[in-house]
Amino acid sequence: MKVERPRGTHDILPSEQPLWQRVTGEMERLCALYGYRRIQTPVFEDTELFARTSGAGSDIVQKEMYTFADRSDRSLTLRPEGTAPICRAYIEHGLHKEPQPQKLYTIGSMYRYGKPGRGRYREHWQLSVEAIGTADPAIDAEIIQLYDTLLQRLGIAEYRLALNSIGCRECRPAYVERLTAWLEEHREELDEEARQKLDTSPLRVFDVKSERIRALLEDAPTIGDSLCAACVLHFALVKAVLVETGVEFTLAPTLVRGLDYYSRTTWEFVGPMANENSTISGGGRYDYLVAEIGGPPTPGVGFGAGIERLILAMEEEGLVEAEPPAVDVFVAVADYEGMVVPRLLKQLRDLGIAADADYAGRSLKGQLTQAGRSGAATTVILRSADALIRRQGQQDEPVAHADVVGRISR
C-alpha cells in the first residue's frame, strides 16, 4: 500500500525550510517591533465559534469547514481562520481586564475545504495579527502598515493595497436595503452563486468570482455613499495616517471581505500572481465580534496573511535564495579508530559550530564527497597520527588531535 499526503496539503521539505524560516522570522521580528505578543490557540474549536462569527451564509460555513463529532458527540471544527479563536481566548482568559489594546499575533495552520490549486491548500499556514480593545483609526493604519513593511523587507515590489469602509450597524442596514433592491431588479442577470448570496447575505455578492457578474456589479450602489458621519470620519483618519506613513493604497468601493464580523475598515493586499488566488493578505475591523461570542462590547481590528501565497509572490519576483550550508564543519575519518568523532562533534556543537560526520560507512572518498554536499566550509580528516583541517581555497593544515577544536574555533 502506497500512502501519500492528503489532497490539498503539502510537505515543507528541508530544502524549503530556510526560506520559510526567513519569512516567519521576519514576521516575528516585525510583530515584536510593533509591540504585538505571540499567542497560540488550539487547532480545533467548538463549531459554534465559527458558525456565530463567520456567518451562516458565508462560504466558510457553507462549504469550507472541516467539522466532526468527537467521541463525546461534541461538534468540533478545525480552525478555518485565526481571528475568532484569538478573540475567544481574549474573553476566556480575561485579557479584556488587562491594559488595552491587547496586541496579539499567531503563526499557525488553518483548514478550509476547497478545490486545491497553486497557492490554495486545504491546510495552509497563516500569520494572524490582531489589535483588540481600541476603536482608534490609527491602529487600523498601523496594522496595515505592519504588513506593508513586511512585504518591503522581504523585497516584494509588485503588490497593491485595496482599501474600503463597509460602515457600521448604524449605517449599513440602509445600504444593504438599497443594494438588495438593486439586486432584486437584476435577479435574472445573476448567476446561481450570486442569487444564493443575495438570499443569505447580499453584501457577499461582491465576493463572486465570475467576471460577468463583477462587470454587472460595477453599476450597483456602493457603501461609500451611505456611510454615517462617524464612519466617514473614521475612514478619513485611517487614510490620513496611511498617507502620513507612506503606505500607498487604492480605494475599492466593492471590497467587503467574506466574513460577517467585519465592520468599517476592510482591506486586501494583492500580489503579483495572475490568478484568483492573488490576494496575499486581507483583514478589517471587527467591532462586534467579541460581544457576539459572549464578551463585553469590544472593538478590534486584524488581518490574516497566508505564508504559502507570500512565498509564491517572492518566487514570482525571483526572490528565492539558494539554501545556505547546513553545517559548518564535516568530520571525516581516514585511518583512525576510537571514540574521537562523537567527542569532537560534541565539543564543536557546544561552541555553537554546526558539525556532522558520516554515518553510512562510506570510504574516505565517499566521506569527502558527502562533506562537499553538506556545504561545510571546513572538513576535518582524522588520521592515526594527526588531523588535517581542510578549508576551501586554503592548503591543508595538519594539527594534533587535541588542537582541532581550538584551531577551528579561533
Image (cartoon, rainbow, N blue to C red):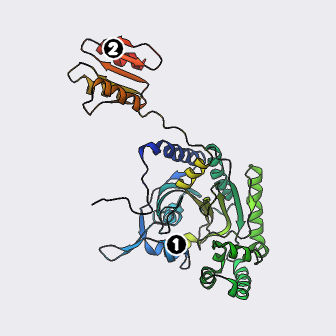
Q: Is residue 366 above or below residue 308?
A: above
> Going by the image, does 283 lie left or right of 236?
left
Q: Residue at point 75% right, 70% down?
A: 230
Residue nearest the viewer, comparing 63 with 24: 63
Amino acid at circle 2: Asp
Residue 63 visible in rendering: yes
Q: Where is residue 197 in the image (x, y as percent from the top left)?
A: 61, 80
Cα–Cα gap, marks 1 and 2: 63 Å
Q: Residue at point 45% right, 56% down?
A: 40
Q: In this view, does 260 lie above or below 187?
A: above
Residue nearest the viewer, comparing 364 with 292: 364
Q: What label does residue 60 carry, if any?
A: 1
Q: Residue at point 51% right, 67% down?
A: 84
Q: What label does residue 230 carry, if any?
A: none
Q: What element carries label 2?
A: helix
Q: Quadrant of the C terminus?
A: top left
Q: Position of residue 267 (x, y in %)?
A: 67, 62
Residue 347 visible in rendering: no
Residue nearest the viewer, comparing 108 with 196: 196
Marks 1/2 in contact by CB < 8 Å: the verdict is no
Q: Quadrant of the N terminus?
A: bottom left
> Going by the image, does 71 lie left or right of 267?
left
Q: What element carries label 1?
A: helix
Q: Where is residue 147 in the image (x, y as percent from the top left)?
A: 63, 52
Q: Name the residue under label 2.
A: 403
Q: Position of residue 13 (x, y in %)?
A: 42, 47
Amino acid at circle 1: Ile
> Going by the image, does 397 lie left or right of 258?
left
* Residue 69 occupies quadrant: bottom left
